[in-house]
Image (cartoon, rainbow, N blue to C red):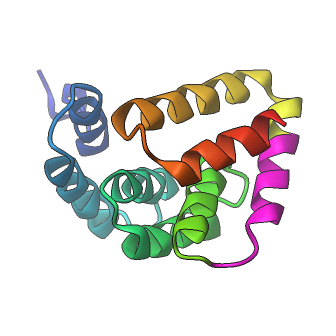
Amino acid sequence: MTATDAPSLFEQALQSYQEGAPLAEVIASFQTITQQEPRLSAGWTCLAWLQLLDNQAQTALRSARMAVKLNPQDPQARINLSLAMLENNVKGVREHIELVQRVRMMAPELAEELDGSIADGLARRPDWQALQKVKAWLEG
């Protein structure tokens, strides 16, 4: 097995999350990823999501802003930013939600992915009011 056959740190961290590893452990992995590859928008998107799940709204807002800055077209990054804005009482959520709604209409496969992500978030944090609000907006 060569080095290129080994799963990347990103893939390993994602797998750890999916297998239910402790949030602190997975957050640390994604912090390492964003330090090593600061231009990797997916790393910032995942980090923001994990920070939101862990009730780290202020740090999640910074991570989500970075993810959107690096990839403004990523609907998951926009959802994360919307959630972080809601949890920090920051205005301007509507424009992000509207962009995600447009993406959902144009790309049904992405809509399915986003729905899966929302379901995952609510399964891991059932009392997540900001996510329940975003879900209702996206369905409405």
Q: Can you say whether 93 is above or below 33 in the image?
A: below
Give the vertical position of 26 relative to 38 (above or below): above
Residue at 70%, 61% in the rendered image: 72
Residue 26 shows up from this direction: yes
Q: Nearer the viewer, residue 64 or 9?
A: 64
Q: x%, y% of residue 117?
A: 52, 33
Which segment did they paint magenta? 90-102
Residue 70 appears anywhere in the view: no
Q: Is residue 91 magenta?
A: yes
Location of residue 138 by image quarter: top right
Which picture quadrant has residue 95?
A: bottom right
Q: Nearer the viewer, residue 75 or 39?
A: 75
> Vertical placement of 87 versus 75: above or below?
below
Residue drawn at (16%, 36%), measured in percent from left and top?
Answer: 21
Relative to 35, is 18 above or below? above
Q: Quadrant of the C terminus?
A: top right
Left or right: where 102 falls relative to 92: right
Residue name at image x 30 percent, y 43 percent: 10
Q: Quadrant of the N terminus?
A: top left
Q: Residue at x 40, y 29 (%)?
A: 123
Q: Position of residue 16 (x, y in %)?
A: 21, 33
